[in-house]
Image (spheres, coloured by chain):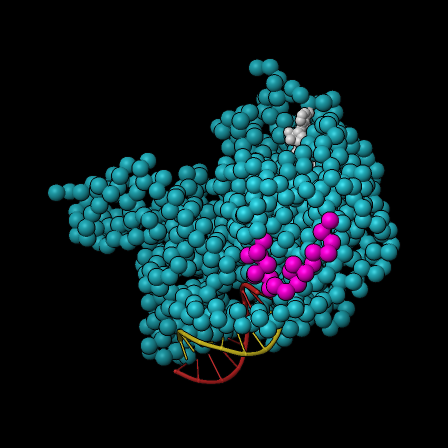
Chain colours: A cyan, B yellow, C red
Amino acid sequence: MTNSLLEGLNNEQLQAVTDAQGILTVLAGAGSGKTKVLTSRIAQMIENGISPYNILAVTFTNKAAKEMRSRLEKILGEEIVKHIWVGTFHSICGRILRQDIEKYKNEEGIKWEKNFVIYDEDESLAIIKNALKILDLDDKVYKPKTIKSEISNAKNKLINAYTFATKARDYYKDKIGQIFTIYEKSLSINNALDFDDLLIMTVKLLEQSAETREKYYQKFSHILVDEFQDTNKAQYQLIKLLFTGNYPLEAIDLDNRTLCVVGDIDQSIYSWRGADYKILLNFRSDFPMAKTIKLEKNYRSVATILEAANKVIENNFERVEKNLYSTKGQGRKIQCYEAQDQAEEAFYIANTAKKYGAEHYQNIAVLYRTNAQSRAIEEAFMALGIPYRMIGGLKFYERKEIKDIIAYLRLIYNRNDSVALKRIINVPKRAIGQATVKKIEEISQENNISMFDVLLEIRKYSEFSGVTLTKIETFRDLILDFIDKKEHFLLSEFVTTILMDTGYLKELEDEDSIESQVRIDNLQEFINVAREFEETETEDELGDFLSQVALVSDVDEITEGSNAVTLMTLHSAKGLEYPIIFLSGLEEGIFPHQRVQNSNSELEEERRLMYVGITRAQEHLHITYAKRRQMWGEYRYSEPSRFIFEIPQNLMETNFSSKIGKEEHFANSTFKTAVKNLGEKYNIEKDKPIANTSFGKNFVAPSIKEKQISSNSFGKNFVVPSTKKQIDKEEKTSFKKKEEFKNVISGVEQARLMAQKLKAQKTNSTCTPIKGGFHSTSFGVGDRVNHEKYGIGKIESIVNIGNSTLYKVEFEKYGIKAIDAEFNRLKLIQ
DNA sequence: TCTTCAAACTTTTTT
DNA sequence: AGTTTGAAGA
Ligand SMILES: Nc1ncnc2c1ncn2[C@@H]1O[C@H](COP(=O)(O)OP(=O)(O)OP(=O)(O)O)[C@@H](O)[C@H]1O
């Protein structure tokens, strides 16, 4: 086979791809092909006979991992790629720990078991709130979120609770130290890890256990890391341990071990969670023999966009100068749009997107600084009927019903998970109230055991009345029964069984509202996810499933192929590229964010974020800002972002002066009616070019010097009470009256629900014909059936989840199981 | 024990 | 403005 995979690479890239010895760093600007180099390098290694089993590739997000995987599969085929470890630091650590956590001991000699669970932000916060209660501290003073991030910061610097507590110099820090200690203790009792633990425990495990270290040292002889500028201390330590196996550098066989890290200091945007680009800068002091390659050709953006990015980032002081040349044409000027408020901004974006034509929707991304900004944009896209998908925001796995079912699975998998137990002990309603739960919890804390352990011997404790005892025991036996059963079920069937046997599904069905219907559909989707996971090769299905669910932030894009505009934060956009980009909310106070305006290094990080944003664009870049924006129910006025003034005027076109004086159009209307008016207006005029009329002038804004802006901009972000509060309130009450008997859900939420419903219906309707008419073979309760795997049984009951049907069948050999009708695995016995 | 309504809080970014 | 939380009532 000729080296077609090397074709088209420039000299420096080629060098980086083919360099097959020792340590290599690739330092290069945005769009210079760093990720492409990594991918090609892996392919090249395989070509050279290196076993996929020996390769570890670390990406920054799960999305990036998936992307890299699928690119590799195209070159190398699935069979080879499945042996390569490609993933985020967290998922890789999760995988290592699932195998070897039992070899780890913490400073107090506490160990974790293989069936540990991973706590997300919410569950970690629950533990912290609990610790506050135990210490009798006020959660107004000790804000759980702040404490969580203090603890997290400490952990990422590899500082443990003991060290933290000893180093505490004031009362507040001392208390945090105490919370930290209890927090860690609770996690261990629950046999649980938080996100940070995944990293630091793996590091400590590799430090402690020579056997484990050697195992992974031997395995991962070729390591590649993308986005290295955003690694933190623990992650760096992990890479060092894996690469050197703790042997002195001189002892490492650099002819057979390689390490390649790539990054761009100007794109370091995660310092707030412990990432430090200095690790990349100082890399050579740890590895003096490392070779460095610079890539200076940008293959992504047209010259105008690249020049704007370069000019903006030049304002940073903490950086190393570098060159980046465009390989594309000049391109169109950057379109800068000044809107009156966030609603108009959103409609401008939606409308401009529409003008690019429906076939381009997939080429468009709208980026914003904070998630809250997405709402107005969503509303505009919905009003204009433009399909969109949102990355981040409210995630699938964060929905209540999904968290509930996951909590059941977690408790069944690891009965020491008291956070899960507390979540579902009274869901669905079992008349086990707060008071009872509190008692159980207190007993567990006094005896240093998990809450489920208390349930196991509930009659030993005299605190509970007879009725309560029965209810608790029923719940306990239900869970014990699930624990017994879990081996005998396919994952998706197990999930279904839980939903049926607990009565969770029934409770939702009885509620019979739009909302409950959507919940049921979501559960159906979750069952589908479980079913998909059944295909994965794994030794511990439930455990690995739970890990995946905890670490992968969203159900992976079913919508990926579909033609929709993408909405996401600037942070999530890292590493991606789109032909058309909208950067929205370019206002002082939003971007750069208010909270960073006083600190230089944080301001520089915001500027790097701007650099990342600009460089996502290939062909067209739109920048928008609003003169005022509704926040917390009030209008807030702000100046355009200083970053706009850092882009040379000759690269931009703007509507700046043409909109002035139109303010009264909005002055008398409430937010909602403003949206409505705009929607109607733009719908009517949708065939007329709107934005074009206002462009064509060069940017005429007075060139304000940065000093001026930063010195007085803070004072200019004043808050003005909204003009028509009176009307607002009236409208709201009359609306409530009208909807008295319905659920009152906000517009976006309602539309979201409907969209989801439609989606669910669509999925199901496309599934049915393919699987071959299960309508023709429906059964009744009491029918005797034969199953291809489980043999003969009798239909016990029939349940509908979403649009699919499940039979609960009592099998002669295997007992009761849930069988999905869609698979057609049952045959009627006459 | 569960429901209802008013008050308080929210907005930085994510694995 | 929307969402979550807490206290009082059923
Ligand atoms: N030699 C090349 N010839 C043509 N296109 C290239 C070449 N190298 C890279 N590209 C293209 O340039 C784009 C950017 O590449 P890539 O995403 O690898 O850059 P990057 O340096 O990782 O960017 P970022 O720093 O923003 O993550 C991709 O579309 C890629 O296919």
Please say whether residue A666 is one of the residues in the magenta stretch: yes
Report x, y in % for residue A340.
68, 55
* Quadrant holding the C terminus of chain A: top left
Residue A821: name its quadrant.
top left
* Quadrant holding the N terminus of chain A: top right
Foreground of the two, A534 or A212: A534
Q: Is residue A767 above or below residue A743?
A: above
Residue shown at the point (76%, 56%) measured from the top left:
A639
Q: Is residue A704 above or below residue A128?
A: above
Q: Is residue A576 visible?
A: no
Describe residue A293's horizontal placement relative to residue A781 as left or right: right
Q: Is residue B5 above or below residue A165?
A: below
Report x, y in % for residue A135.
61, 74
Report x, y in % for residue A162.
68, 63
Residue shown at the point (82%, 54%) measured from the top left:
A600
Residue shown at the point (65%, 59%) measured from the top left:
A665
Q: Is residue A220 visible?
A: yes
Residue A84: name its quadrant.
top right
